[in-house]
Image: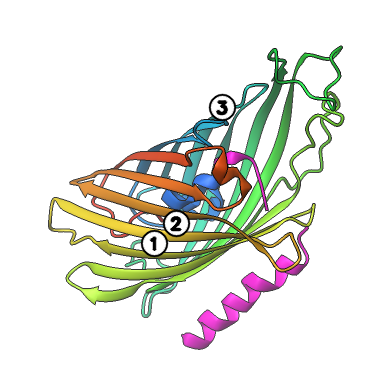
Amino acid sequence: MKKLSLALLAVFFLPISLIVAQEMPIYDQYHFNYYLINPAVAGADKCSHLMLTTKNNWIGMDGPSTQALSFRTRITGKNIGLGGYIYNDKTPNFRYVGGQATFAYHIPMSDGARYLRDVKLDRQLSFGVSVKANNHAFEAVEGTLNENIDPANTSFSELSLNANVGVYYIDYGFFAGLSATNLIPYDLDNYGRQEPSNPLTAFLFVGYGFDLGDGNEIEPSVNFNYDANDNKQLELNLKYSSNNEVDDLGYWAQLSYRHNMDDGGGKALSIIPIVGVRINKFQLAYAFNWTLNELANHNYGTHELMLAYSFCVPKKFCR
């Protein structure tokens, strides 16, 4: 099975070079919910999850704020997963509101029970596809216009439709996912130089959870984003969790390092410490994004909160 894991990992990496990293802010909240960047995660475990995240960017600079509400589940006795989310993202001039609906299919591959429906999901290959709708609106706010904004065109709104696809594989402690969003090329007629349409973007994540016994685990992981505008971003994560399923209390802590690779050699963007707690079936977490580039002198960082309810006690935090 190690050979199978390596082969699948190679399959995940190869398409990255063919898919032409920044996306809409919703995808920046994947630390709490990998479903936001990969539709194949919907229903990948037997538990259903309802999750609310809110994020305030660049405190002190009137930065954007984002809220997202998501739900994902696995149909009982089936290999089918369903999911969806709605989001709201707002800046002084722009507002994005949208949602996504997902269908996923999962192939359990545990030894002695290949392809069966009701098996222990230690090894599984998943595929997912989503359709999404986004409404892009612009409303001029006095004092915020610059030379790139046409004063004669101070408000408009436009709806766009698009799609995402993803594949996700777990093999005991190992997990990896590859997805692509904005598969349908689309130009927003009203934007012109004000705001480009969202580019085709690929997301890759790979990680491994090392079992330390008694519900304790340490999990290093890597996330890589690459879009059609040749923006690239690498993120390194290290998470420690204590989550014995028979206990009413669990907790985790994570440290992430985000690195921009667009400046010929790379430039550090931020360090993100995250802490979270599980109380029975509820989860609460907080992330602080400490900016390391020139923005650090003008803001107090980015704050992100997550509140979730899982309909069973989850084995893994935020995956």
* Residue at figure coordinates x 50%, y 38% from the top left: 84
The answer to whether mark 1 and mark 2 are in CB contact below 8 A is yes
Reply above or below: 25 against 224.
above
Of the residues tagged 1 and 3, which is closer to the observer?
3
The outermost residue toward the left is 247
Mark 1 vs 3, N-terminal side: 3
Residue type pointed to by label 2: Asn
Q: What's the magenta region?
A: 1-27
Residue type pointed to by label 3: Asp
The answer to whether mark 1 and mark 3 are in CB contact below 8 A is no
- Residue 20 is a magenta residue: yes
Residue type pointed to by label 1: Arg
Reply above or below: 306 against 265.
above
Q: Quadrant of residue 234?
A: bottom right
Q: Secondary structure at mark 2?
A: loop
Q: Name the residue carrying label 1.
A: 117
Residue 79: mark in rendering: 2
The outermost residue toward the front is 297
Residue 62: mark in rendering: 3
* Residue at figure coordinates x 70%, y 73% from the top left: 14
Taking depth in this image into account, of 179 and 188 the one nearest to the observer is 188
- Across and down, in percent, residue 245 comes to 18, 59
Res. 175 visible in picture: no
